[in-house]
Amino acid sequence: MTPRARLIGCGSFPWMGLALGVLVLWAAACAARSPIAVPADLPNRTDQGEFQLRWALVRESATVRAVGLMESHRIVPWATLALFGVDRNGRVVSRGQSDVQAGFGGSRLPFEVALRPTGREERFELVVIHAHQGKPGD
């Protein structure tokens, strides 16, 4: 390879094309993610001490979704929410979970958790099953 070709970068960094391709795919995935449409009416509430969830249950033909807002007065980099479908005997017959990320504290963060119902559900319960509190790196 000539010194001029190396100066311009032709052939000296074969991974550059791959890196650029990955960057383009990542940007497309981020752009394709639509914001969560939180309903105006959030009739359900889950209070788990540090976490308050206000949510609506959205039933569709093949899925049931809990959509709402999560609040905490502490900084929480991420949390995992679970939606349980419970039958009349109190047994969990369906389950879905979703991560809420972006760090929040003293603000409201939208969430959406979906599950595939079995048809035996009598009620649905939404809970925080895991959360990391504090500043990132703590």
Image: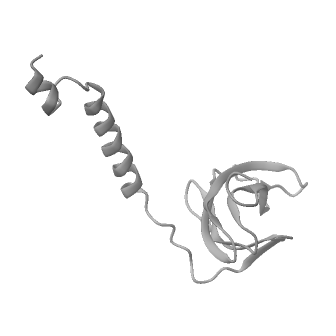
Query: Where residue 137 sits: x, y (%)?
Result: 69, 51
Which picture quadrant has residue 53?
Answer: bottom right
Q: Please identify the residue farthest to the front as the structure is shown.
A: 3
- Is residue 33 or residue 86 the one in the foreground? 33
Query: Where residue 128 sits: x, y (%)?
Result: 77, 59
Name the image quarter holding the N terminus: top left
Which picture quadrant has residue 135?
Answer: bottom right
Q: Is residue 89 left or right of residue 102?
A: right
User: What's the image's color scheme?
Assistant: one colour
Which picture quadrant has residue 21?
Answer: top left
Q: Is residue 125 left or right of residue 114?
A: right
Q: Residue at x 35, y 51 (%)?
A: 27
Residue 104 vertical position relative to residue 2 in the rendered view, above or below: below
Q: Residue at x 11, y 22 (%)?
A: 3
Query: Where residue 23 sits: x, y (%)?
Result: 34, 43
- Is residue 60 or residue 38 the one in the foreground? 38
Q: Is residue 37 left or right of residue 22?
A: right
Query: Where residue 114 sits: x, y (%)?
Result: 62, 56
Residue 29 vertical position relative to residue 57 in the rendered view, above or below: above
Q: How many marks?
A: 0
Q: Residue at x 64, y 75 (%)?
A: 108
Q: Please identify the residue farthest to the bottom as the structure is shown.
A: 40
Q: Please identify the residue farthest to the right as the structure is shown.
A: 89
Q: Residue at x 86, y 70 (%)?
A: 49
Do we see residue 117 in this rendering? no
Q: Please identify the residue farthest to the top as the structure is shown.
A: 1
Do we see residue 89 in this rendering? yes
